[in-house]
């Protein structure tokens, strides 16, 4: 602030209450950086005392009483703004330090005039009706989700991450309900069909981590850290519950023990607690004492694939890591939200890797992070890891694969650059220095800089502050059958600016008889010679980044696919698969159809589950995104037969399931339809393939897309589902999957209303069926309206929904008409929000590439 004073203007309500001063500069909606800085300089020792009365019906309003206490450094006559993104009628009464005042609203803020405030201790009392936007009220339960700035949609508060506070909560709920919150349960009393739960004062946390869940949940209790710890859940499958509960708590305890030992800091909060949420729009959310998890990720049956088991262990480790990284030490402003996510992912990888073979850890790291990071970083809408944020109302748009997937790759390279022990020492110092406080990325870099001779500022610019990735080529000169010289060069994928990505990776030369020459490369220049390879024999082919640690587009040898049988190591193969796919997308490698033939040829040979899942994903994307409709129909029968015939060759039941899912995803022939319909109707899967209720639901939906009249099929599947939450989900999706275009039209039109988008997980899945390639001749008409709704979706939805909305909508389009609609929309909106524009460019990147690649 230039003057050191925040100037505000507000509407004056005519009344008999005290007059309030009018200021000249208008306050913004949301929470601006200027407002946040001002409040940070004037407020401290904040406490919230909340009493909420929650009715059973999700349509009835929740009434609340609140006391906000704080220390205030009064500066001149500036008013104080609290955040409350609700209608004026939701604020019933306000008193400041015992004096009743008329509430004054301005752009989602309650303005308290300076005349009512003291220098020092202050208390403000509110009676209000809670906003529903972030309460996620469903039939029979609710859960709060306030990240990044949505606490203000429920109750008046100072909704910014660097104003940490303590919360005392009391909930009045239906007698049959259960509830959980950040603090320990202090006492319970029952009266007239309701019960009142009083919770202990919470630990010091920001508003986005304040949380509670209440509803018709079952409760299961086990010991964690010698204290009773509860999980609330609504899962009804007794087999999944029995098969999963011990694993959930074991994984939680193992993660907790690992992080306590690694950080040398005991668990930093007063209690543990979990909630398994049906159709949760995130994987998890790290509220201390009340961590939310996606139900379907936690509860697995005995036939769970390795990928499902990995996802569960990663998810639990990720959320537990947040207790130190994000919860105890919190970013100062949400431009550094990536810090908590990179550490959670990076440390989760470390903790799960500690209990497995190093090669298993490396393969999981590679297949989890690199394809996802590349899916954004290869696009013209790529964003840097660290972004600029002017207002918290835009913070939700900063989330995505760059902070979740590229950032862990960056952090691994940083650890290699500094050295593992020095890196660990620096992180320990950072955690201790900023415990229960806030920190920035430069704060951490300053600490790490003391532990290395490397130029971290230059390194930081290209890896953290700039978007994009390098293209890494090699040039080998031979003298007869010997290597005369071998050089590696790098340049940015886009733009003319010369950049250097300092990084380490492995390079392998493959020879007959399974002989391999490996060399570790420390790439520190635009071009450098690899002298260790001089004099080596000419190889069959060269595989760059064979260990999968390096980041970028690594060019590939054309000979690699024909001699691929010599690549025995699963990590080498995974890295090769990824490089082949990335080069194909860039038009510098093989064609889509050639690569599809290669990948399908690997289905009988590839026995490593993570690799098989990787290439079947690529098969599906190439088939639907980069083959013309005519070519798909020409090769469909051969592709189907290849996948189906590969089933018996796989000994692992998980691998068989992966192949079955791939077959189900791409089939088009009548023969395949009849085959799958028989399996669905009889509920008898192929030999060695295990299918649960959710699998049969997905199969029914796949069949419905190939069925000219699917009403009876979908209705029959609906009657098979027993879990009420899964019934509600299917009812949403089946409208989008209907063969009746009028039903699909009504479904899409209904998405204009927020209430029809409340179950974001189900809506995202439904959009995938609505815009499936087999439906695009009619669904293409929905694209302009889908783009028009995007800003509204960003304002009203949770952080991942805009990206989910776009990718589920545009993800498989390939025709030029769809691309023209996107271009027209962007041309007509030249001042469109830049972050949302990037999201559009990211989601439509395959569509753009298809104009060149589809023949």
Image (cartoon, grey):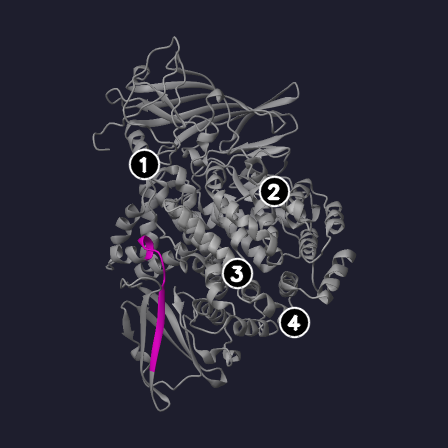
- Residue 582 lies, in percent from the top left, at 45, 67
- Residue 475 lies, in percent from the top left, at 34, 78
- Label 4 with label 3: CB-CB less than 8 Å: no
Label 4 vs 2, first from the N-terminus: 2
Nearer the observer: mark 3 or 2; the answer is 3
Gap in Å between the C-alphas at discs 4 and 3?
Answer: 29 Å
Q: Which residue is drawn at the image coordinates 35% and 44% (left, top)? A: 335
Secondary structure of residue under mark 2:
loop
Label 4 vs 1, first from the N-terminus: 1
Residue 266, image quadrant: top left
Label 2 vs 1, first from the N-terminus: 1
Which residue of the protein is positioned furthest toward the bottom in this rendering? 480
Label 1 vs 3, first from the N-terminus: 1
Secondary structure of residue under mark 3:
loop
Residue 727, image quadrant: top right
Q: Which residue is drawn at the image coordinates 50% and 45% (left, top)? A: 801
Q: For residue 646, which numbered disc appears in the image?
A: 4
Q: Which region is colored magenta?
A: 463-476
Q: Is residue 344 visible?
A: no
- Please state which of residues 736 and 534 is positioned toward the viewer in this rendering: 736
In the picture shown, does residue 388 fall above or below 665? above
Q: Which residue is drawn at the image coordinates 48% and 60% (left, top)? A: 846
Task: Judge from the rendering whether residue 704 lies leftward or rightward of residue 203; answer left or right.
Answer: right
Secondary structure of residue under mark 4:
helix
- Residue 476 lies, in percent from the top left, at 34, 81
The residue to which callout 3 is attached is: 814
- Label 4 with label 1: CB-CB less than 8 Å: no
Gap in Å between the C-alphas at discs 3 and 2?
Answer: 33 Å
The residue to which callout 2 is attached is: 278
Q: For residue 33, which numbered disc appears in the image?
A: 1
In the picture shown, does residue 555 fall above or below 625? below
Gap in Å between the C-alphas at discs 4 and 2?
Answer: 35 Å
């Amino acid at each position: 602030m230039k003057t050191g004073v925040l100037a505000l203007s507000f509407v004056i309500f005519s009344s008999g209450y005290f007059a309030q001063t009018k200021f000249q500069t208008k306050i913004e909606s949301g929470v601006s950086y200027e407002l946040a800085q001002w409040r940070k300089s004037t407020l401290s020792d904040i406490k919230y005392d909340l009493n909420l009365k929650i009715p059973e019906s999700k349509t009835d309003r929740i009434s609340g009483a609140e006391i906000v206490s704080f220390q205030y450094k009064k500066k001149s006559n500036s008013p104080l703004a609290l955040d409350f993104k609700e209608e004026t009628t939701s604020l019933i009464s306000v008193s400041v330090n015992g004096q009743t005042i008329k509430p004054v609203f301005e752009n989602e803020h309650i303005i308290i005039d300076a005349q009512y405030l003291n220098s020092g201790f202050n208390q403000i009392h509110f009676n209000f009706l809670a906003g529903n936007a972030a309460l996620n009220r469903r039939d029979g339960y609710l859960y709060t989700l306030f990240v990044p700035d949505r606490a203000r949609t429920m109750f008046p508060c100072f909704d910014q991450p660097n104003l940490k506070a303590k919360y005392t909560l009391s909930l009045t709920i239906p007698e049959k309900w259960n509830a959980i919150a950040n603090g320990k349960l202090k006492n319970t009393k029952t009266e007239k069909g309701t019960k009142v739960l009083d919770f202990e004062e919470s630990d010091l946390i920001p508003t986005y981590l304040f949380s509670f869940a209440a509803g018709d949940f079952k409760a299961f209790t086990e010991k964690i850290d010698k204290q009773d710890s509860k999980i609330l859940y609504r899962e009804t499958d007794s087999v999944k519950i029995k098969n999963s509960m011990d694993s959930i708590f074991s994984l939680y305890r193992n993660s907790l023990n690992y992080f306590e030992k690694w950080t040398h800091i005991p668990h930093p909060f007063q209690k543990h607690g979990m909630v398994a949420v049906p159709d949760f729009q995130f994987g998890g959310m790290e509220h201390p004492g009340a961590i939310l998890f996606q139900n379907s990720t936690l509860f697995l049956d005995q036939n769970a694939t390795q990928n499902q088991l990995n996802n569960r262990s990663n998810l639990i480790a990720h959320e537990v890591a947040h207790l130190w990284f994000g919860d105890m030490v919190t970013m100062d402003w949400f431009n550094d939200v990536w810090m908590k996510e990179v550490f959670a992912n990076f440390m989760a990888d470390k903790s799960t890797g500690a209990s497995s073979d190093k090669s298993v850890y490396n393969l999981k790291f590679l297949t989890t992070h690199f394809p996802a990071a590349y899916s954004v970083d290869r696009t013209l809408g790529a964003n840097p890891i660290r972004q600029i944020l002017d207002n918290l109302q835009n913070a939700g748009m900063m989330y995505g694969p760059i902070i979740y997937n590229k950032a862990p790759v960056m952090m691994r390279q940083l650890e290699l650059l500094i050295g593992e022990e020095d890196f660990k020492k620096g992180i320990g110092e950072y955690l201790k220095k900023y415990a229960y406080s806030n920190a920035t990325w430069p704060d951490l870099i300053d600490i790490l800089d003391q532990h290395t001779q490397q130029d971290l500022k230059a390194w930081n610019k290209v890896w953290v502050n700039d978007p994009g990735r390098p293209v890494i080529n090699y040039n080998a000169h031979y003298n007869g059958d010997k290597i005369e010289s071998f050089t590696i060069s790098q340049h940015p994928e886009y733009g003319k600016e010369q950049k250097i990505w300092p990084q380490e990776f492995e390079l392998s030369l493959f020879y007959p008889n399974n002989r391999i020459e490996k060399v570790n490369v420390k790439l520190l220049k635009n071009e450098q010679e690899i002298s260790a390879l001089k004099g080596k024999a000419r190889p069959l082919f060269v595989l760059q980044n064979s260990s999968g640690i390096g980041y970028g587009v690594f060019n590939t040898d054309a000979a690699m696919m024909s001699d691929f049988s010599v690549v025995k190591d699963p990590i080498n193969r995974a890295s090769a698969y990824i490089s082949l796919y990335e080069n194909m997308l860039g038009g510098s490698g093989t064609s889509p159809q050639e690569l599809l033939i290669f990948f399908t040829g690997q289905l009988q040979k590839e026995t490593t589950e993570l690799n098989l899942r990787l290439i079947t994903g690529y098969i599906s994307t190439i088939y639907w995104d980069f083959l013309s409709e005519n070519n798909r129909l020409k090769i469909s029968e051969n592709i189907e037969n290849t996948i189906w015939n590969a089933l018996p060759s796989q000994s692992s039941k998980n691998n068989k399931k992966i192949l079955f899912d791939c077959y189900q995803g791409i089939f088009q022939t009548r023969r395949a339809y009849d085959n799958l319909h028989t399996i669905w109707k009889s509920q008898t899967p192929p030999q060695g393939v295990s299918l649960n209720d959710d699998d049969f639901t997905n199969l029914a939906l796949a069949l419905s897309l190939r069925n000219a009249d699917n009403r009876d099929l979908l209705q029959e599947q609906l009657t098979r589902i027993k879990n009420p939450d899964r019934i509600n989900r299917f009812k949403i999706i089946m409208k989008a999957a209907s063969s009746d275009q009028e039903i699909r039209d009504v479904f899409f039109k209904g998405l204009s209303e927020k209430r029809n988008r409340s179950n974001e997980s189900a809506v995202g899945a439904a959009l995938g069926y609505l815009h499936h390639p087999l439906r695009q001749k009619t669904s293409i008409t929905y694209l302009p309206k889908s783009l028009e709704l995007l800003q509204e979706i960003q304002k009203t939805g949770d952080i991942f929904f805009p990206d989910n909305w776009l990718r589920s909508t545009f993800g498989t389009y390939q025709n030029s008409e769809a691309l023209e609609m996107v271009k027209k929309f962007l041309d007509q909106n030249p001042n469109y929000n830049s972050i949302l524009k990037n999201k559009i460019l990211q989601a439509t990147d395959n569509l753009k590439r298809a104009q060149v690649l589809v023949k």
